[in-house]
Amino acid sequence: MSEDNLGERVKAVETTVESHDKRIDRLEKNNESLTKLTTLMEIQTETNKEVANTVKSQQETLVKMNDNLDGLNTRVGKLEEEKNDNEINIMKDLIRPGIIAVVLTIIFIVIENATGIHIRQ
């Protein structure tokens, strides 16, 4: 081997080594980025699981609240019906004696006018 040939080969090897160094640096940066991305994905996966559990819990709570509201609406409806029935019964209880009193008063007036006898005092 000649010295010229050896110098060219050394230069070629140095160029190749320099190229490999650059590639290794890029690969190391990519590897660091990949490691960070993997860590972030693991964190995001755990966060998604926690969010899913929270949403499921909230959904169950909302279903229970809806059931409770349905029950309350039913009870309020029944209470309103009872209230209306009670109001009607109260009105009947109040009006009936009033009507009887008015009718009796009219009858007494008619009898008094017809007979001249005063029944009322």
Image: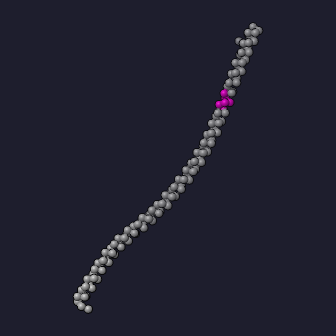
Residue 115, quarter of picture: top right
Task: Report whether 37 appears left or right of 94.
Answer: left
Looking at the picture, tell me which residue is in the foreground, 121 or 86: 86
Q: In this view, does 41 lie above or below 72?
A: below
Q: In this view, does 27 lie above or below 95?
A: below
Spot occupied by residue 38 in the image (x, y as percentages of width and height):
42, 67
Which residue is painted at 53% across and 53% down in the image? 58
Looking at the picture, tell me which residue is in the foreground, 24 or 52: 24
Residue 6, quarter of picture: bottom left
Task: Report whether 117 appears left or right of 18.
Answer: right
Range covered by the magenta-colored residues: 86-91
Q: In this view, does 84 lie above or below 53?
A: above
Which residue is painted at 58% across and 50% down in the image? 64
Which residue is painted at 23% across and 88% down in the image? 4
Task: Report whether 24 appears left or right of 93.
Answer: left
In this view, which residue lies farthest toward the left?
4
The reply to whether residue 117 is visible in this rendering is: no
Spot occupied by residue 1 in the image (x, y as percentages of width and height):
26, 92
Quadrant of image for the C terminus: top right
Whether the magenta-drawn stretch holds residue 20 is answered as no
Looking at the picture, tell me which residue is in the foreground, 97 or 33: 33
Spot occupied by residue 37 in the image (x, y as percentages of width and height):
41, 66
Q: In this view, does 92 lie above or below 53?
A: above
Whether the magenta-drawn stretch holds residue 90 is answered as yes
Which residue is painted at 49% across and 58% down in the image? 51
Residue 71, quarter of picture: top right
In this view, which residue lies farthest toward the top?
116
The reply to whether residue 13 is visible in this rendering is: yes
